[in-house]
Image (cartoon, rainbow, N blue to C red):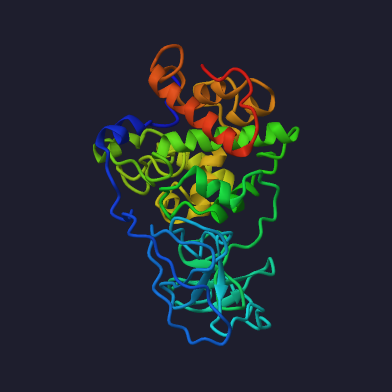
């Protein structure tokens, strides 16, 4: 009997109505006079959730200043770089020449170190680390520009969702789920959102993000919250066992990867030891996205095709649900959950400006 590939947690999430402590109630609108050149820096601290208008300048938690390029509801200046630009108090915005050392795998870095990575971009250490890869270990590193402000590098692939669209899709998302992490992970799967015409590419992106939305409560939850289930995902009868422990293979990440056999297979495919250290899926944003994209692009689960193939071959969004959750939701198993996924898909295709296509239900 085929074992289930994922455990669904959203019904529990919806019932609990938990509000993460990191989410901040929006204070009164923050408005300051637009800056002028050669003024001393004396701007208010950035407040998550405050309403900012174009021209506002704030001091971020890293001690640097940022100016709002677009109105926004308190987005993080180091993440939502379409809404914010680094700002210097003399009014200058031209970065000085970068002259930082090359990143060296295995070298010891401390918070504040800046390195030039192999892709020609710069990264700043947000936490001490023993030479982790800046494009994978995104909790330890942030992209950096030489005018003193960290920022997302321009996407190098052809992912059909912009950062501003991503932010509008997930207004309450956990900061762990970065747009840059998603774009970096997508590059590891060359066919993902790059197959077919523009409409097909956007529909696949929307289908993936709609299912992600459903599994994580809007990119809020990183790991399964029902800890009572944790011991159930180890299958010690398999030859490789559960080296990380009986309770280590619970649901994590955008599609809630679970079971030791999934961690083993995903890790083997990605070249990462996820069987020995499954916690990477809840610690590194790019690894987390990659683990879910592994399932999306390579696994049919309880369905008959991968979710990727369902979208690029015209089978429709409904077949992605079948490949993720099968009879638990499809064929009348739980029509309410199916409808929730479809509603999210319709909303996200609307943001991307593409029709949802046919065959939305399973």
Residue positioned 53% across, 59% down in the render: 80
Quarter occupied by residue 63: bottom left
Residue 213 left/right relative to 105: left
Q: Kindly indicate the quadrant of the structure image that contains residue 44.
A: bottom left
Query: In this rendering, does residue 349 appear at all?
Result: yes
Residue at the far top in the pictured view: 331
Locate residue 297, reporting x and y percent. 60, 35
Query: Which of 5 and 49 lies nearest the eye of the viewer?
Result: 49
> Does residue 296 show up?
no
Q: Residue at x 48, y 78 (%)?
A: 112
Whole-percent x, y for residue 98 in the image: 66, 81
View extreme (front): residue? 33
291 or 360: nearer the eye?
360
Q: Quadrant of the N terminus?
A: top left
Residue 9, position in %: x, y? 35, 33
**Relative image position of residue 106 (x, y in whole percent):** 53, 72
Outermost residue on the right side: it is 197
Q: Is residue 156 above or below residue 203?
A: below
Q: Nearer the viewer, residue 26 or 218?
A: 26
């Amino acid at each position: 009997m085929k074992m289930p590939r994922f455990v669904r947690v959203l019904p529990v999430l919806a019932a609990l109505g938990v509000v993460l402590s990191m989410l901040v109630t929006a204070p009164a609108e923050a408005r300051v006079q637009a800056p002028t050149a050669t003024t001393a820096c004396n701007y208010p601290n950035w407040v998550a959730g405050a309403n900012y208008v174009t021209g506002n300048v704030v001091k971020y938690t890293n001690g640097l200043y940022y100016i709002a390029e677009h109105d926004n509801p308190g987005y993080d200046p180091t993440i939502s770089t379409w809404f914010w630009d680094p700002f210097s108090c003399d009014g200058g915005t031209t970065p000085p020449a970068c002259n930082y050392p090359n990143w060296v795998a295995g070298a010891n870095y401390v918070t504040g170190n800046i390195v030039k990575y192999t892709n020609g971009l710069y990264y700043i250490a947000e936490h001490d680390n023993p030479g982790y890869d800046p494009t994978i270990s995104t909790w330890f590193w942030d992209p950096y520009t030489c005018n003193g402000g960290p920022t997302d590098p321009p996407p190098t692939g052809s992912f059909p969702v912009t950062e501003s669209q991503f932010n509008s899709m997930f207004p309450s998302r956990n900061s762990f789920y970065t747009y840059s992490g998603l774009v970096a992970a997508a590059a590891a799967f060359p066919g993902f959102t790059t197959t077919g015409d523009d409409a097909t590419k956007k529909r696949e992106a929307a289908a993936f993000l709609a299912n992600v939305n459903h599994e994580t409560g809007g990119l809020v939850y990183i790991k399964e919250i029902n800890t009572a289930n944790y011991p159930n995902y180890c299958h010690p009868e398999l030859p490789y066992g559960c080296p990380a422990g009986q309770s280590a293979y619970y649901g994590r990440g955008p599609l809630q990867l679970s079971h030791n056999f999934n961690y083993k297979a995903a890790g083997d495919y990605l070249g990462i030891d996820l069987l020995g250290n499954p916690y990477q899926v809840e610690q590194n944003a790019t690894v987390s996205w990659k683990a879910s994209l592994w399932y999306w692009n390579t696994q049919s689960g309880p369905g008959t095709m991968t979710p990727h193939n369902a979208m690029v071959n015209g089978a429709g969004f409904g077949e992605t649900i079948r490949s993720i959750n099968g009879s638990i939701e499809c064929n009348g198993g739980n029509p309410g959950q199916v409808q929730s996924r479809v509603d999210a898909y319709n909303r996200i295709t609307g943001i991307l400006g593409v029709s949802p296509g046919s065959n939305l239900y399973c």
